[in-house]
Image (spheres, rainbow, N blue to C red):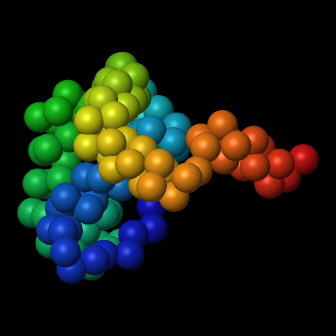
């Protein structure tokens, strides 16, 4: 897990978002363990309380479960739940502005998709 911290968002939130991205990308799958709080804190030279706060948010969202004495593990259905919520958020928050910009620029989504398909390596 590599992270470049930015100053605009609390570190615990950036760490939480990185774990979420890893679940969405399939890097972390259901049942997989998260690195220990101590390991993450040491690797990134951050306070263990910061890591614990990020992990607790994941627990609160039912994406990760604590197993006493064993650590934190990705819950069953975490990826599907994230996909659903991220899609809904995208459609509610990001798509309207993106759609308006495409219209303002006179861009056709179908044409953009065809052009993107031609750019992909074969």
Comparing 65 with 85, the one in front is: 85
Residue 110: x %, y % from top left? 66, 37
Residue 31: x %, y % from top left? 40, 27
Q: Is residue 110 above or below residue 17?
A: above
Q: Is residue 81 above or below residue 68?
A: above
Residue 111 placement, left or right of 20: right
Which residue is rendered at x = 80% and y = 54% of the image?
Answer: 119
Which residue is rendered at x = 52% and y = 38% of the image?
Answer: 26
Comparing 121 with 53, the one in front is: 121
Which residue is rendered at x = 59% and y = 41% of the image?
Answer: 109
Q: In the orientation shown, which residue stands out farthest toward the top?
A: 77
Total labels: the figure holds 0
Residue 118 placement, left or right of 78: right
In this orientation, does residue 42 appear?
yes
In this orientation, does residue 48 appear?
no
Comparing 17 with 120, the one in front is: 120
Residue 117 placement, left or right of 104: right
Which residue is rendered at x = 30% and y = 29% of the image?
Answer: 88
Residue 75 quadrant = top left
Residue 97: x %, y % from top left? 33, 50
Comparing 36 with 64, the one in front is: 64
Residue 2: x %, y % from top left? 45, 67
Q: Is residue 66 above or below residue 2?
A: above
Q: Quadrant of the N terminus?
A: bottom left
Residue 64 quadrant = top left
């Amino acid at each position: 897990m590599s992270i470049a911290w930015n100053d605009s968002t609390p570190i615990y939130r950036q760490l939480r978002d990185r774990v979420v991205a890893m679940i969405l990308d399939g890097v972390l799958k259901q049942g997989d363990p998260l690195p220990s709080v101590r390991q993450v804190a040491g690797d990134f030279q951050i306070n263990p309380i910061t890591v614990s706060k990020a992990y607790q948010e994941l627990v609160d969202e039912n994406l990760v479960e604590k197993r006493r004495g064993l650590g934190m593990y990705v819950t069953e259905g975490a990826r599907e739940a994230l996909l659903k919520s991220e899609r809904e958020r995208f459609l509610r928050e990001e798509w309207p502005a993106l759609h308006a910009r495409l219209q303002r620029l006179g861009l056709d989504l179908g044409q953009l998709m065809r052009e993107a398909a031609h750019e992909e390596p074969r």
